[in-house]
Amino acid sequence: MALIAPHIANGIVIMINCKLINQLAKQANEKIKEGSFKILNLLHHITAGMKSITTEMQYIANDELRQACGGAGYTLASGIAYHFLANSPLPTFEGVNVLMLQQSARPLLKVIGDIEKGKK
């Protein structure tokens, strides 16, 4: 049971972030109508980080599931091998996860640099 708790916690955090992303997307759409694209930059950085984290989590979970099923995890009849094959490229689609994390971290590093320079 203790091994399930981190997965549940991760799922809750992802769900909360998805709600935040939906709210930001709605705000961005309204601001775009007014001619402002400022929120899109923030939205890009958040979604880049979420893409990287969630696709990495699903890759690891699929691999753990496949391994836990032993030889049956490799048979097409189980559906696990097909699921693994269908989803394993996700960490590289639309940008490799390492680059997505860098894009996500960029605004945080900028804020840290500003603070070091004495800016609020």
Image (cartoon, rainbow, N blue to C red):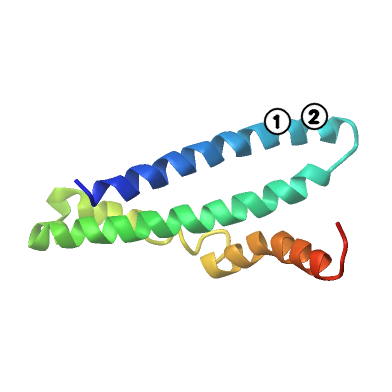
The residue lying at 28 percent from left, 51 percent from top is: 83
* Label 2: element kind: helix
Asked whether, in this view, residue 28 is left or right of residue 118, the answer is left
Quarter-of-image position of residue 20: top right
The residue lying at 42 percent from left, 61 percent from top is: 89
Q: Name the residue under label 2.
A: 30
Q: How far apart in space, not on screen, are marks 1 and 2 (Cα)?
A: 6 Å
* Label 1: element kind: helix
Q: Which residue is nearer to you in this view: 34 or 11?
A: 11
Quadrant where the C terminus sits is bottom right
- Pinpoint residue 98: horizontal percent, then vertical percent: 55, 69
Amino acid type shown at disc 2: Glu
Pointer 1 and pointer 2: residues touching (CB < 8 Å)?
Answer: yes
Q: Which residue lies furthest to the front in this view?
A: 118
Amino acid type shown at disc 1: Lys
Asked whether, in this view, residue 31 is left or right of residue 69, the answer is right
Above or below 57: residue 43: above
- Pinpoint residue 95: horizontal percent, then vertical percent: 57, 63
Q: Mark 1 points at which residue?
A: 26
Asked whether, in this view, residue 58 is left or right of residue 66, the answer is right
Above or below 96: residue 9: above
| Within-10-Å neighbours for mark 1: few <14, some 14–19, many 20+ | few
